[in-house]
Amino acid sequence: MSVTLHTDIGDLKLELYCEKCPKACENFLALCASDYYNGSLFHRNIKGFMVQTGDPGGTGKGGESIWGKYFDDELHDTIKHDRRGVISMANKGPNTNGSQFFIAYAKQPHLDLKYTSFGRVIDGLDLLDEFEKLPVDPKTYRPLTDTRLISVTIHANPIAEMTD
């Protein structure tokens, strides 16, 4: 299963782990399919750590799952933050997943078993270099120039196929 995030900077193709993280992937795919993420700002960008988006309000404080409430973590010993390009749900603590997600710039082992990692970048890893170079406010890590997730292309949606 894959999707492409079309951003102001270029495209990132993601592989999603639908079998291991069905709730996170169902939520992400449904939000993508409903255009929920279209126009979302990359509101947090920390060089060497990650870039974050998924709050339609652009503040980094909002966003909601398709269920209208938080959903539980899907943590697995076999899925790790062990490389550049890992995609994970952002949260405020255990079992507080909503709509926000982040892309890791490097290995982040301290995030293992704390954040639901539901995919990885499979094409466009070089684009992450461009994200990392964006100037940010040193206090908030917000990019100084608005950078957006313009739209998402879903290449195959197994969740929709299960309901047909």
Image: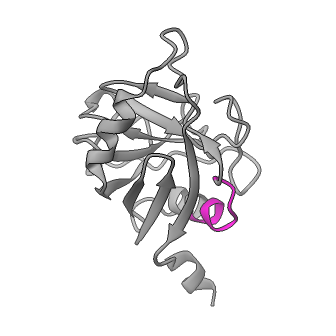
Residue 110 coordinates in the image, percent (x, y): 31, 27
**58 lies above or below 162:** above
**Quadrant of the drawing holding the C terminus:** bottom right
**In the rendered image, the vertical position of residue 162 relative to residue 88, given as above or below:** below
Span colored in magenta: 29-37
Q: Residue at x 38, y 61 (%)?
A: 13
**Residue 113: which quarter of the image?**
top left
Is any atom of residue 26 visible in this view?
yes
Q: Nearer the viewer, residue 48 or 144?
A: 144
Residue 62 horizontal/vertical position (percent):
71, 35
The residue shown at (62%, 48%) is 71
The verdict on residue 24 being magenta is: no
The residue positioned 44% from the left and 44% from the top of the image is 88
Name the spot of residue 31 as percent of width and height, x first.
64, 59
Quadrant of the drawing holding the N terminus: bottom left
Instruction: Tell which of 48 and 114 is nearer to you.
Output: 48
- Give 126 or 96, whichever is nearer the viewer: 126
